[in-house]
Image (cartoon, rainbow, N blue to C red):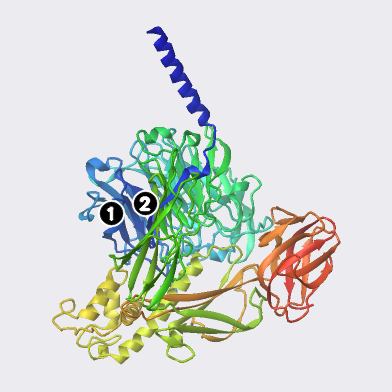
C-alpha cells in the first residue's frame, strides 16, 4: 500500500511538474485554428456568447441578431428604432456612429433571462439609453418587458464617440463605457477645447472632464430587480457630492472601447481610442495623438482632454484668438470651460498603462505604426473554463489579449501580481484581423472575435464572427475560400478557389466539398478543390467549402455570389494635374466615367449625372476617416435619392401626392417626417408601393405598382425619406470639371485630399442594387521617409529612415511624377549620391542626384513604383519632397 501511495504521489508530482513546465512554453501557432461562424454581417458592434454556443450580437443600424451553431443560421431577435444620423446646426446631414451599440447578459441570465441593451433611440430627444429586456435565449425579445435604467444625454449635431462597452464584475455591478460625444476634426489632431459660443460639440470639456455629465466616462451601477439601479460603494464621487454624478467610476475618457474585468483581481481594463494628429507641437498645442490600453484598480481621472499617454499635457488653446495659453497640470487639473456644469478642480490625472502613437513606439514596439484604434480584450484564467472542451493553454494564464481595429494584430500582455506591466508578445504573428471590434473568450474556452470589416458605415463583405480554437491533438484544416467574381449578370461563370488551405498535421490527406445553395435552397455539390460553375438563373448563391482531414476533423468557410446584376464600373480620372500629390491652391481637371451593363453609362446619357456622387474632402494629417465616411454616405444617399424624383415623374405618384401639400394621399414631406429615424420604414414603404393598400393615412386606396423594379422602388423611398432633412448646403461636385486644392482655413497642409466618385445602380432581374466607387487620394507633397512602401539596408527610428550605406534603398509604390520637376531630401546633413529608378532597385534609371542637391526630374515620367537608391555614406533621411517647380 505504501509503495502504491508513493508511486501515485510520484505520478501526481510528475504530472504537476510537466504541466508546470508546459505553462512556460509558448504553444505552436499551428495549434490554433480559425473557425468562421458567420459572414457578411452588417456593421456588427458587440456580442455575447451563451452556454450552448449561440452568439447574440448587435448591429449598429438596429438589428439584434442570434447565431445558432446547430443550424449555422442567423435570426433577428429584435429590431430597435435607432438614430443613425447627425444633423448639424446648419442643417447638414451626415452618418452617425450612433445606433445599437451594446448587449450583455445578466450574471443570472439562466435564472431571470435578463439582457441589457445600450442604444441611441430614434426621435428628437438626443440621448443614448440603457434598457433591460427579458429574453428566452432563442426567440424574439419580449418588447413588453422593457425596463428603462439610464439615459446619457448627448448632442446629435456632430460626430463622434459613443462607447457602449459593458461588463459585469463578480458583485454583479454593471460597468458601461460612454464616449465624449465630441467632434475633433476642427482641432488639427490636438485636443478639442473650443469654448466659443455655440461650439460645445467641439469642446470635450462638456463631457469627458465634466464631473456632472455622463459622457466620456466608465459608469458603474448595480441593476436592481425592479428595473432601477443603485450606486455601489467606492465610485469616484460619493452620492450627494454637489456638481457630480455618482454613477462615475472613471472619467477623462475619449472613447473607451471594450471593457474587461480580471476575474481574479477585480481590476478593470479597456482600450481607449485616441485623437488623430501625428505631429507633436510642444511649443503651442501639445503632443501628437496616442491610443491607450488602460487599467483601473480604483476610480480615477484618466486625463482626457487635457492629457494623453503618460500624462503628456495639452495647451489651453484659444480657438477664437488662435493663441496658446497655459499648459494643463496633471497634478492639479482644472475644467474652466463655460460648457462645464461640474466641479472646476478635478482629481489628479492617471497616466496610461500602455500607449502608442501613429509612429512606431520604442517602449511598445510590437504595437507597430500607422492608423490606430485600440480595442480591449479579455484576460485569460484557466479557472474560468473548468470543464471546457478547448481551453487555451496555461501559458496564457493571467495575460491580457488586446487588438487594434486598424492594425489588425492581437497582442498578449503579461502583468505581474501587483498589476504592473511586464511585457508583450504577438499572438499568431501571421494572423491578420479585419476591423476587430469586440473580442472575448466563450464558455468552450475558444477566443471569439467580431470583425467589423475595413470600411466605415458599410456592409463590408469581410465582416465576420470567428472563433479561434486551441487544438492539443489533431488539428483542423485552416480553410481559405475565394471566388473570382462576387457579382455579375447572368449567365455568370465563376471560379471557386481553396488556395491557401492548409493542415498542420504532417501526412493528413484533405478532401474538399463545395455545397452551393441558391436563395437558401440546395443547388449543387462539387467534390473538387477548385471548381468552376456557371449560374444561369438570377439569385444569391452561397458556396460553402468544407475541408476534411484523414482523421475526420473538418472546417468550413463560404463565399457569396449575386448573379443577375452586373456591378457598375466607376472611374475617377485626373485629366490634368498630378494624381499622387496636391499642391495648395493649384487646380486640377478631372472627369468621372460610369458604365453599368443594365443601366447604361454617363457617356450614353442613360445614367443621369445627378445619380453619381462626387465628393472632395480634406483629411487633416493623421485624422481618422470616420467623419469623412459619414459625409460620403450622406452624398451617396442624396445621389441615389435624386433619381427617385425622375421615377416619380414618370409614374402616377403625383396624381395622389405632392412634395409639400396633401392631395388624395399625404404629401411626401408628411410621410418623411412620420417615418424619420424609423429603421424599418424603408422596407415597409417599399412593400407598400409594390402591393398597394390603405389604412395608414385614411381610407384612400394606394394603387399597387408591381411593375416597378426593386431599384426604382428603393430610389423613390430614399427620395421621400430624405425630405425629412434639410438639403445639404454644399453643392455636389459635377461629374467633370476642375477642382482647386485649397486647404481649409486653420488646417495644416500635411494632410490629404480624398476625391471620390460612387454610383449605385437600379438593380436588375429581381436582384438588389450594386455599388461601385473609385477613390483618389492626393497626399501632401512631402512624404515622411517612414511611409516608404518597402526598404532594404534601412533602419527606421521614429520618423527617420537611417540609411546604412551603399546600395540601400527606399521605395514608394505607384507614385505619379506628372508635373514634378525636382525632388529634395531632408537629411541629417551627410552628402552622397542617390539614384531614382522605376520598378525595382535595379530598374530603369530615371535620374541621379545628391542628398544635398536633390534630383531634377525629366518630363514625361508618369506613374511608377519609385526606388531611391542611396550610394553614399550612412545618412538619416527624414522626408522626401516632390516639387512642382525648380
Q: Is residue 485 left or right of residue 109?
A: right
In which quadrant of the rendered view does residue 490 lie?
bottom left
Number of labels in the image equals 2
- In this rendering, is residue 169 above or below 648? above
How far is the residue under mark 1 from the one under mark 2? 19 Å
Q: Which mark is residue 47?
A: 2
- Outermost residue toward the right? 831
- In this rendering, is residue 420 above or below 321? above
Mark toward the viewer: 1 or 2: 1
Secondary structure category for the residue under label 2: strand
- Outermost residue toward the top? 2
- In this rendering, is residue 824 above or below 689? above
Which of the marked residues, 1 or 2, is nearer the chain's N terminus? 2
- Marks 1,2: beta carbons within 8 A: no
Q: Position of residue 288 (x, y in %)?
A: 62, 56
Q: Position of residue 254 (x, y in %)?
A: 49, 54
Q: Is residue 766 left or right of residue 381?
A: left
Q: Which residue is mark 1?
A: 71
Secondary structure category for the residue under label 1: loop
The crowding category of the residue bearing disc 1, from other C-alpha atoms within 10 Å (few below 14, some 14 to 19, many at least 20), is: few
**Of residues 6 and 408, the one drawn nearer to the viewer in this rendering:** 6
Q: Position of residue 186 (x, y in %)?
A: 55, 66
**Of residues 527 and 769, the one drawn nearer to the viewer in this rendering:** 527
**Of residues 42 and 792, the one drawn nearer to the viewer in this rendering:** 792
**In the rendered view of the protein, which quadrant contains the N terminus?**
top left
Q: Position of residue 721 (x, y in %)?
A: 32, 77
- In this rendering, is residue 399 above or below 717? above
Q: Which mark is residue 591?
A: none
Amino acid at each position: 500500500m505504501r509503495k502504491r501511495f508513493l508511486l501515485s504521489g510520484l505520478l501526481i508530482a510528475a504530472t504537476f511538474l510537466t504541466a508546470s513546465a508546459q505553462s512556460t512554453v509558448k504553444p505552436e501557432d499551428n495549434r490554433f485554428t480559425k473557425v468562421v461562424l458567420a459572414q457578411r454581417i452588417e456593421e456588427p458592434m458587440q456580442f455575447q456568447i451563451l452556454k450552448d454556443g449561440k452568439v447574440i450580437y448587435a448591429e449598429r443600424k438596429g438589428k439584434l441578431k442570434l447565431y445558432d451553431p446547430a443550424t449555422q443560421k442567423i435570426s433577428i431577435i429584435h429590431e430597435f428604432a435607432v438614430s443613425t444620423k447627425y444633423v448639424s446646426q446648419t442643417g447638414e446631414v451626415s452618418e452617425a456612429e450612433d445606433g445599437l451599440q451594446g448587449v450583455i447578459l445578466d450574471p443570472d441570465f439562466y435564472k431571470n433571462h435578463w439582457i441589457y441593451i445600450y442604444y441611441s433611440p430614434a426621435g428628437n430627444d438626443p440621448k443614448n439609453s440603457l434598457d433591460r429586456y427579458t429574453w428566452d435565449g432563442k426567440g424574439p425579445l419580449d418588447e413588453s418587458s422593457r425596463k428603462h435604467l439610464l439615459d446619457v444625454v448627448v448632442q446629435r449635431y456632430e460626430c463622434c464617440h459613443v462607447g457602449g462597452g459593458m461588463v459585469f464584475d463578480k458583485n454583479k455591478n454593471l460597468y458601461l463605457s460612454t464616449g465624449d460625444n465630441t467632434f475633433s476634426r476642427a482641432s488639427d489632431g490636438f485636443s478639442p477645447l473650443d469654448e466659443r459660443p455655440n461650439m460645445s460639440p467641439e469642446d470635450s470639456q462638456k463631457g469627458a472632464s465634466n464631473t456632472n455629465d455622463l459622457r466620456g466616462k466608465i459608469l458603474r451601477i448595480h441593476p436592481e430587480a425592479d428595473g432601477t439601479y443603485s450606486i455601489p460603494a467606492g465610485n469616484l464621487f460619493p452620492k450627494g457630492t454637489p456638481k457630480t454624478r455618482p454613477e462615475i467610476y472613471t472619467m477623462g475618457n475619449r472613447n473607451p472601447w471594450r471593457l474587461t474585468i480580471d476575474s481574479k483581481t477585480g481590476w478593470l481594463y479597456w482600450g481607449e481610442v485616441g485623437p488623430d494628429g501625428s505631429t507633436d507641437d510642444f511649443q503651442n498645442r501639445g503632443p501628437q495623438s496616442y491610443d491607450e490600453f488602460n487599467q483601473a484598480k480604483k476610480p480615477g481621472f484618466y486625463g482626457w482632454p487635457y492629457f494623453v499617454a503618460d500624462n503628456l499635457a495639452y495647451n489651453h488653446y484659444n480657438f477664437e484668438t488662435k493663441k496658446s495659453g497655459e499648459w494643463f497640470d496633471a497634478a492639479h487639473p482644472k475644467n474652466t470651460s463655460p460648457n462645464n456644469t461640474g466641479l472646476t478642480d478635478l482629481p489628479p490625472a492617471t497616466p496610461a498603462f500602455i500607449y502608442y502613437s501613429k509612429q512606431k513606439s520604442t517602449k511598445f514596439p510590437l504595437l507597430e505604426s500607422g492608423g490606430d484604434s485600440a480595442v480591449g480584450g479579455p484576460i485569460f484564467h484557466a479557472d474560468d473554463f473548468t470543464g471546457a472542451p478547448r481551453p487555451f493553454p496555461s501559458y496564457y494564464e493571467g495575460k491580457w489579449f488586446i487588438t487594434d481595429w486598424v492594425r489588425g494584430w492581437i497582442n498578449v500582455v503579461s502583468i505581474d501580481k501587483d498589476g504592473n506591466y511586464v511585457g508583450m508578445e504577438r499572438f499568431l504573428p501571421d494572423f491578420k484581423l479585419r476591423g476587430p471590434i469586440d473580442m472575448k473568450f466563450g464558455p468552450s474556452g475558444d477566443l471569439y472575435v467580431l470583425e467589423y470589416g475595413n470600411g466605415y458605415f458599410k456592409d463590408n463583405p469581410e465582416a465576420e464572427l470567428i472563433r479561434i480554437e486551441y487544438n492539443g491533438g489533431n488539428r483542423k484544416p485552416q480553410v481559405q475560400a475565394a471566388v473570382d467574381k462576387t457579382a455579375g449578370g447572368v449567365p455568370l461563370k465563376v471560379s471557386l478557389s481553396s488556395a491557401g488551405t492548409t493542415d498542420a498535421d504532417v501526412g493528413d490527406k484533405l478532401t474538399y466539398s463545395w455545397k452551393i445553395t441558391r436563395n437558401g435552397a440546395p443547388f449543387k455539390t462539387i467534390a473538387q478543390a477548385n471548381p468552376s460553375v456557371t449560374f444561369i438563373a438570377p439569385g444569391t448563391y452561397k458556396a460553402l467549402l468544407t475541408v476534411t482531414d484523414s482523421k475526420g476533423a473538418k472546417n468550413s468557410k463560404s463565399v457569396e455570389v449575386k448573379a443577375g446584376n452586373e456591378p457598375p464600373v466607376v472611374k475617377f480620372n485626373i485629366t490634368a494635374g498630378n494624381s499622387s500629390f496636391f499642391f495648395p491652391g493649384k487646380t486640377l481637371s478631372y472627369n468621372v466615367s460610369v458604365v453599368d451593363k443594365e443601366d447604361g453609362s454617363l457617356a450614353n446619357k442613360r445614367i443621369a449625372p445627378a445619380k453619381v456622387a462626387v465628393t472632395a474632402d480634406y483629411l487633416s494629417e493623421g485624422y481618422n476617416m470616420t467623419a469623412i465616411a459619414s459625409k460620403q454616405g450622406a452624398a451617396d444617399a442624396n445621389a441615389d435619392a435624386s433619381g427617385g424624383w425622375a421615377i416619380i415623374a414618370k409614374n402616377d405618384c403625383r396624381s395622389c401626392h405632392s412634395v409639400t401639400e396633401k392631395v388624395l394621399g399625404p404629401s411626401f414631406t408628411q410621410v418623411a417626417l412620420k417615418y424619420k429615424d424609423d429603421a424599418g420604414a424603408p422596407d415597409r414603404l417599399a412593400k407598400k408601393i409594390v402591393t398597394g393598400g390603405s389604412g395608414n393615412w385614411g381610407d384612400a386606396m394606394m394603387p399597387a405598382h408591381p411593375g416597378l423594379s426593386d431599384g426604382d422602388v428603393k430610389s423613390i423611398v430614399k427620395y421621400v425619406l430624405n425630405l425629412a432633412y434639410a438639403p445639404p448646403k454644399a453643392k455636389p461636385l459635377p461629374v467633370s470639371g476642375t477642382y482647386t486644392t485649397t486647404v481649409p482655413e486653420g488646417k495644416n497642409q500635411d494632410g490629404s485630399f480624398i476625391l471620390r466618385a460612387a454610383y449605385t445602380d437600379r438593380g436588375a432581374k429581381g436582384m438588389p442594387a450594386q455599388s461601385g466607387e473609385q477613390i483618389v487620394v492626393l497626399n501632401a507633397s512631402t512624404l515622411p521617409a517612414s511611409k516608404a512602401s518597402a526598404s532594404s539596408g534601412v533602419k527606421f527610428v521614429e520618423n527617420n529612415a537611417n540609411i546604412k550605406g551603399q546600395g540601400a534603398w527606399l521605395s514608394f509604390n505607384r507614385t505619379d511624377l506628372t508635373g514634378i520637376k525636382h525632388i529634395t531630401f531632408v537629411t541629417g546633413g551627410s552628402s552622397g549620391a542617390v539614384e531614382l529608378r522605376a520598378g525595382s532597385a535595379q530598374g530603369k534609371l530615371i535620374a541621379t542626384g545628391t542628398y544635398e542637391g536633390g534630383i531634377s526630374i525629366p518630363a514625361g515620367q508618369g506613374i511608377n513604383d519609385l526606388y531611391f537608391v542611396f550610394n553614399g555614406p550612412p545618412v538619416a533621411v527624414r522626408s522626401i519632397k516632390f516639387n512642382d517647380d525648380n
